[in-house]
Image (cartoon, helix red, strand yellow):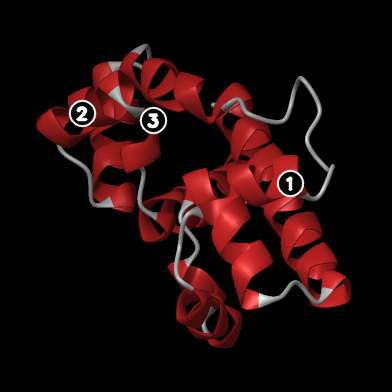
Amino acid sequence: MEPISQLLDSYFNLRRAVLRSLDYEHLSKSEFSQLTGLEGNAKYRRQTNPALWKPVEIYQLAIGLGLRDTTSNQLPKLAQLIDHLSVQEKKAVYKAGSLTAEKLMVRDQNWTTWLPGELEKLQVWCFKASIDYKG
């Protein structure tokens, strides 16, 4: 369970850094569109509701803002880590992240399909599981 927790913590740390940098960069709509492939209005919608940022958009911004290093994109490994859990742990993860075996297979084939809400739910579950485990 620890590798999953570390991977999610790494992703959310990068996400926070990217969003913080985005606030300071003051990118124009055209610069934002070049970096992400999204229209300029998407920037405003995502700034008012950060839960809308998809992981692939976070990584594109990280690269564009110079924040990405070689270890930051571990998200493609998440589905494999979940798949190697015991049956009991896997069921708990599925329930916590609103996942199914089919969804996990899709995420394994294409990591860009992870939804922000799934990742947030998994991180909360990992945090609760670590508290329960400790004591």
The residue where tag 2 is placed is 106
**Residue 128: x %, y % from top left:** 55, 53
Q: Give the spatial CA distance, label 1 vs label 2.
A: 27 Å
Residue depicted at 49% across the width and 44% down the height:
56
- Closest to the camera, between mark 1 and mark 3, is 1
**Residue 3: x %, y % from top left:** 61, 23
Which is more toward the observer, 32 or 2?
Answer: 32
Asked if disc 3 and disc 2 are in contact, CB closer than 8 Å, the reply is no
Instruction: Return the residue found at the far left.
Output: 102
Task: Kindly identify the amino acid type of the residue bearing the numbered disc 2.
Answer: Val
Which is more toward the observer, 132 or 27?
Answer: 27
Where disc 1 sits, the SS reads: helix
**Residue 110: x %, y % from top left:** 31, 26
Task: Kindly identify the amino acid type of the residue bearing the numbered disc 3.
Answer: Trp
The residue where tag 1 is placed is 64
Residue 72 horizontal side relative to residue 83, left or right: right
| Residue 32 in view | yes
Q: Give the spatial CA distance, label 3 vs label 2.
A: 8 Å
Q: Residues within 10 Å of mark 2 (few under 14, many from 20)?
A: some
- Quarter of the rendering occupied by the N terminus: top right
**Residue 5: x %, y % from top left:** 61, 36
Q: Say above or below: 12 vs 83.
A: below
The residue where tag 3 is placed is 111
Instruction: Return the residue found at the far right.
Output: 24
Residue 8 horizontal side relative to residue 101, left or right: right
